């Protein structure tokens, strides 16, 4: 990691600690498939990162992402857009994945998305694929699919009143949920269904994790399968 990147990461993490201290995180009952504790203040144990430019693990532009364990959950501040996952977090068949994410002041970058992905495969390779469900601070959501180097829009940016918008100095809390059944996949925010798509279109079997676009400052207090 370069000296500049190191200073940026340290500053982002310090800001995250100060901001997170003011939030009372609710407990969510999740079936975690991997260890999320330990390594406090450092990269969560076993987690992987890949940027849209192709950087993986600790190489290249991944160094511009501040990603640190801060119980409960982890805090991250992105430079490039990226996906973050633990290899043991996989689901198939009928299942539900849920994540509680706190968005911190956007500094005017309200069109940058953040959220979940499911159905991940070959995430370290050129043939990577996954379907992602994002929110952004203008109150809209998106469902999109990555297939190698190309992306396919399943539901374009659409307004949803249930999305909590960040304003002032307070963090905005949103609970994203993906419910997978034999026939379809429902995407919800704070208990309100955003869209329901055919299972065959979403292709949800595979690894799940977090996707965050450019210059986003957020705390992921939980991400996992709901019991």
Image (tube, rainbow, N blue to C red):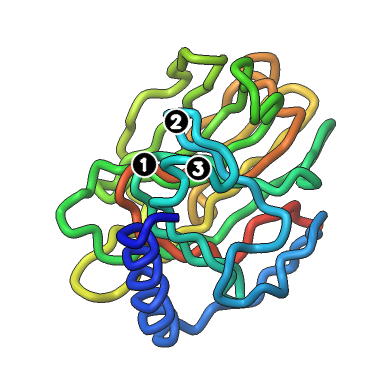
- Name the image quarter holding the C terminus: bottom right
Q: Residue at x 30, y 60 (%)?
A: 4
Q: Residue at x 21, y 66 (%)?
A: 167
Residue 213 horizontal side relative to residue 165, left or right: right
Looking at the image, which residue sits at the far front?
3
Give the number of the disc on residue 80: 1
Q: Which structural element holds mark 2? A: loop
Q: Residues within 10 Å of mark 3 (few under 14, many from 20)?
A: many
The residues tagged by marks 1 and 2 sit, at their Cα atoms, a distance apart of 7 Å
Q: Is residue 151 above or below residue 177?
A: above
Q: Residues within 10 Å of mark 1 (few under 14, many from 20)?
A: many
Q: Which structural element holds mark 1? A: loop
x, y (%) of residue 133? 50, 37
Q: Is residue 30 above or below residue 183?
A: below
The residue wearing badge 3 is: 211
Q: Residue at x 71, y 48 (%)?
A: 86
Q: Which structural element holds mark 3? A: strand
Task: Please report whichever mark, 1 or 2, sits nearer to the chain's N-terminal start.
Answer: 2
The residues tagged by marks 1 and 3 sit, at their Cα atoms, a distance apart of 11 Å
Give the number of the disc on residue 52: 2
Q: Quadrant of residue 100?
A: bottom right
Are the residues at dot 1 and dot 2 in contact (C-beta closer than 8 Å)? yes
Looking at the image, which residue sits at the far left?
108
Are the residues at dot 2 and dot 3 in contact (C-beta closer than 8 Å)? no
Task: Please report whichever mark, 2 or 3, sits nearer to the chain's N-terminal start.
Answer: 2
Q: Is residue 126 above or below residue 68?
A: above
Q: Residue at x 38, y 38 (%)?
A: 141
Q: Quick one: 118 or 161, which is closer to the camera? A: 118
Task: Please report whichever mark, 1 or 3, sits nearer to the chain's N-terminal start.
Answer: 1
């Amino acid at each position: 990691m370069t000296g500049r990147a190191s200073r940026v990461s340290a500053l982002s993490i310090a800001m995250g600690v100060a901001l997170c201290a003011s939030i009372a995180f609710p407990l969510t009952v999740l079936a975690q498939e991997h260890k999320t504790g330990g390594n406090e203040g450092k990269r969560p144990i076993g987690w992987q990162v890949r940027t849209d430019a192709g950087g993986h693990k600790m190489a290249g532009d991944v160094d511009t992402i501040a990603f640190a364990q801060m119980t409960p959950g982890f805090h991250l501040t992105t430079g490039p857009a990226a996906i973050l996952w633990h290899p043991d977090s996989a689901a198939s068949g009928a299942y539900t994945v849920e994540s509680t994410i706190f968005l911190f002041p956007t500094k005017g970058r309200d069109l940058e998305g953040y959220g979940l992905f499911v159905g991940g495969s070959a995430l370290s390779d050129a043939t990577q694929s996954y379907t992602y469900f994002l929110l952004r601070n203008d109150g809209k959501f998106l469902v999109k699919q990555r297939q190698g180097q190309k992306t396919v829009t399943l539901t374009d940016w659409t307004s949803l009143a249930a999305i909590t918008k960040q304003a002032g100095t307070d963090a905005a809390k949103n609970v994203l949920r993906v419910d997978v059944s034999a026939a379809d996949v429902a995407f919800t925010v704070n208990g309100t269904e955003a869209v329901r798509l055919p299972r065959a279109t979403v292709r949800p079997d595979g690894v799940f994790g977090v996707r965050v676009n450019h210059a986003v400052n957020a705390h992921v207090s939980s991400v996992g399968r709901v019991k």
